[in-house]
């Protein structure tokens, strides 16, 4: 894994100054060892591309989202934009990077927090729209391409440089739409056939990882399956059935017995969450061993999984969908509006008036779309924000640990899926049709937890978790963790940047024992680690720094 930053300026002096700032970036803001090196300079010296870390391809980013061509630097994103690009415009120059903190450091934005991002972070646990933790550093939208020309951004119209998905007449409906998705998904997994050792699929008993397993089998890609859980958990049981049906090796790893975290555990988690997710995710999220800064290269297999499968099911729209024909439209509108409100404004009272207004302004386009078409708006909101912001930040953390290919996110797969009518996605019809095309034997196996939409929940179709499942300390922590989270936020004092955005009285209420809103407490503490700059201490031993 390595990071890339491109500079374009109106003068050679301005380009050299920004490239020099990139080379001198404080290594504490980057989750992998440097240093930064100039990989490419344009003839004339008004553009440059730099890499942080070892890059096998000079001038091209890890995901191919930033590259040099001729005398020009380019950047692009796919529909799901899970490999993000961040842009900053300064007088006479523009900077793009696949690491927001790096772009902020180079352009002097590290100490200028964006209150709109903070509002989304507290409510959803991740940013929305194009906001980042740093004012003026913006995420490039989905399916966009730009050229950096003499310090200016030139946008390329969508479709000019990316081949369209070729469709026959009517191919976006019914079985033909499923065929387009099946073809795109099979092509997305095909590169895994060249990796050595064989790819490892994170296999559960749900819908999405079995779809990827079916695509791997259809493409004749060798792979191994791995499931994390206890032997009697439905995910383990059903994954075993899938692996047996496909004839692939299946490994089960057992969870460690839940321990009692101490203050050092929590502090280390808060700091590292900001570092590995580029300030975009709460420490409530489980990012696995990616929480460790500078993870050692394990040389393990390339990982894959079912991330992004909700895009085939209409994202948030399926949650709000009501199928009653007599009252479907009004019921859908009411359910969609309530779901949107609960997701986006659940912790609005934490914000001071100015930041609250700035955050609400970012919601206005989505709210207007909701009024025009409730379910379509929720489908779009999921693509732009849950996939394009949450999954992008999580993916960056995962990639620090091991190679990762997520076959349900590529541009062609998402584009083919979204060409299918929303109703066919929300009803699980598309998902089941694709699975039937790729590996119909897996359709008859039970699911873990949630049945196919509209299917009755019976013992033959769904396996449910046994009572007494392992506790999750992120939700079930005790007084020690609760006290630490409260002290960590409130002990920074009134001068803390946090309380320029958050109302202290509201924070005190949220953090008061017994902390009923555990997810909110984690988000508030993570925001404190970010805005206070304490995350820059992520490489320090947390137990020692507690006493400084």
Image (spheres, rainbow, N blue to C red):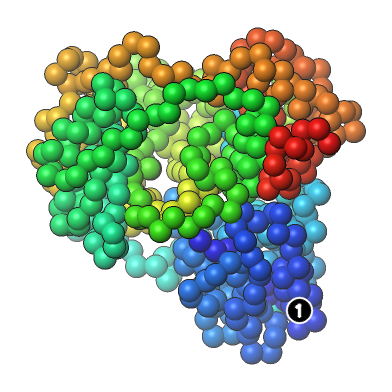
Q: Can residue 512 be seen in this view?
A: yes
Q: Position of residue 9 (x, y in %)?
A: 72, 76
Examine the rendered structure and indicate whether residue 25 appears above or below residue 463: below
Q: Toward which corner of the image does residue 234 lie, by quadrant?
A: top left
Residue closest to the eye, 334 or 473 = 473
In the image, what residue occupies the spot 14% across and 18% down? Answer: 460
Answer above or below: position of 431 versus 524.
below
User: Residue at coordinates 44% horizontally, 23% vertically from top-left?
Assistant: 257
Answer above or below: position of 270 versus 408: above
Quadrant hosting residue 146: bottom right
Left or right: 252 in relation to 516: left
Kindly give the residue lying farthest to the bottom in the view shown: 43
**Left/right of residue 493 with respect to residue 407 in the rendered view:** right
Q: Quadrant of the C terminus?
A: top right
- Can residue 430 be seen here? The reply is no
Residue at 76% over, 68% down: 24
In the rendered image, the vertical position of residue 34 relative to residue 365, given as above or below: below
The x, y position of residue 366, in whole percent, is 55, 37
Q: Position of residue 60 (x, y in %)?
A: 51, 73
Q: What element carries label 1?
A: helix
279 with respect to 429 (left or right): right
Please state which of residues 265 and 210 is positioned toward the viewer in this rendering: 265
Q: Which residue is found at the position 22% from the left and 27% from the top?
A: 237
Nearer to me, 37 or 178: 37
Which image quadrant for residue 86? bottom right
Q: Which of 490 and 33 is in front in this view?
A: 33
Residue holding disc 1: 16
Find residue 175 and report its horizontal and vertical position in percent. Answer: 15, 44
């Amino acid at each position: 894994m390595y990071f890339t930053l491109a500079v374009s300026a109106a003068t050679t002096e301005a380009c050299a100054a920004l490239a020099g700032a990139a080379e001198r970036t404080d290594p504490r803001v980057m989750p992998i060892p440097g240093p930064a090196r100039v990989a490419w300079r344009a003839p004339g010296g008004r553009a440059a591309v730099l890499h942080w870390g070892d890059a096998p391809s000079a001038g091209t980013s890890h995901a191919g989202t930033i590259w040099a061509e001729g005398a020009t630097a380019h950047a692009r994103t796919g529909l799901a934009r899970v490999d993000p690009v961040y842009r900053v415009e300064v007088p006479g120059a523009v900077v793009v990077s696949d690491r927001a903190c790096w772009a902020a450091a180079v352009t002097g934005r590290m100490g200028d927090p964006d209150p709109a991002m903070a509002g989304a972070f507290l409510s959803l646990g991740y940013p929305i729209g194009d906001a980042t933790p740093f004012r003026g550093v913006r995420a490039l939208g989905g399916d966009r391409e730009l050229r950096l020309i003499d310090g200016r951004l030139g946008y390329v119209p969508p479709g000019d440089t990316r081949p369209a998905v070729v469709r026959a007449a009517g191919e976006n409906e019914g079985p033909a739409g499923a065929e387009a998705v099946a073809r795109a998904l099979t092509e997305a997994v095909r590169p895994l056939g060249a990796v050595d050792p064989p790819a490892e699929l994170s296999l559960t008993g749900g819908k999405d990882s079995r779809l990827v397993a079916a695509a791997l089998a259809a493409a004749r890609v060798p792979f191994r399956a791995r499931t994390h859980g206890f032997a009697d958990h439905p995910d383990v049981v059903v994954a075993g059935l899938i692996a047996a049906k496909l004839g692939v090796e299946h490994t089960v790893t057992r969870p460690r017995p839940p321990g009692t975290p101490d203050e050092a555990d929590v502090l280390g988690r808060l700091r590292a969450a900001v570092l590995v997710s580029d300030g975009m995710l709460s420490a409530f999220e489980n990012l696995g061993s990616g929480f460790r800064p500078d993870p050692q290269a394990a040389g393990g297999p390339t990982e894959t999984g079912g991330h992004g499968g909700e895009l085939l099911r209409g994202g948030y729209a399926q949650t709000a969908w009501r199928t009653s024909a007599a009252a479907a439209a009004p019921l859908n509108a009411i359910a969609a509006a309530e779901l949107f409100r609960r997701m986006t404004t659940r912790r609005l009272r934490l914000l001071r008036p100015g930041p609250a207004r700035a955050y609400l302004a970012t919601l206005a386009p989505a709210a207007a779309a909701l009024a025009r078409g409730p379910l379509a708006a929720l489908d779009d909101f999921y693509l732009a924000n849950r996939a394009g912001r949450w999954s992008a930040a999580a993916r960056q953390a995962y990639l620090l640990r091991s190679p990762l290919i997520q076959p349900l996110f590529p541009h062609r797969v998402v584009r083919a899926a979204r060409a299918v009518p929303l109703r066919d996605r929300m009803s699980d019809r598309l998902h089941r049709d694709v699975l039937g095309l790729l590996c119909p034997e897996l359709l008859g196996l039970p699911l873990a937890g949630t049945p196919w939409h509209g299917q009755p929940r019976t013992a033959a179709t769904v396996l449910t978790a046994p009572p007494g499942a392992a506790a999750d300390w992120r939700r079930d922590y005790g007084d020690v963790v609760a006290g630490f989270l409260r002290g960590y936020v409130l002990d920074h004092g009134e001068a803390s940047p946090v309380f320029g955005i958050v109302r202290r009285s509201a924070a005190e209420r949220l953090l008061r024992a017994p902390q009923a809103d555990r997810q909110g407490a984690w988000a508030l503490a993570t925001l404190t680690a970010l805005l206070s700059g304490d995350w820059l201490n992520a490489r320090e031993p947390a137990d020692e720094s507690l006493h400084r």
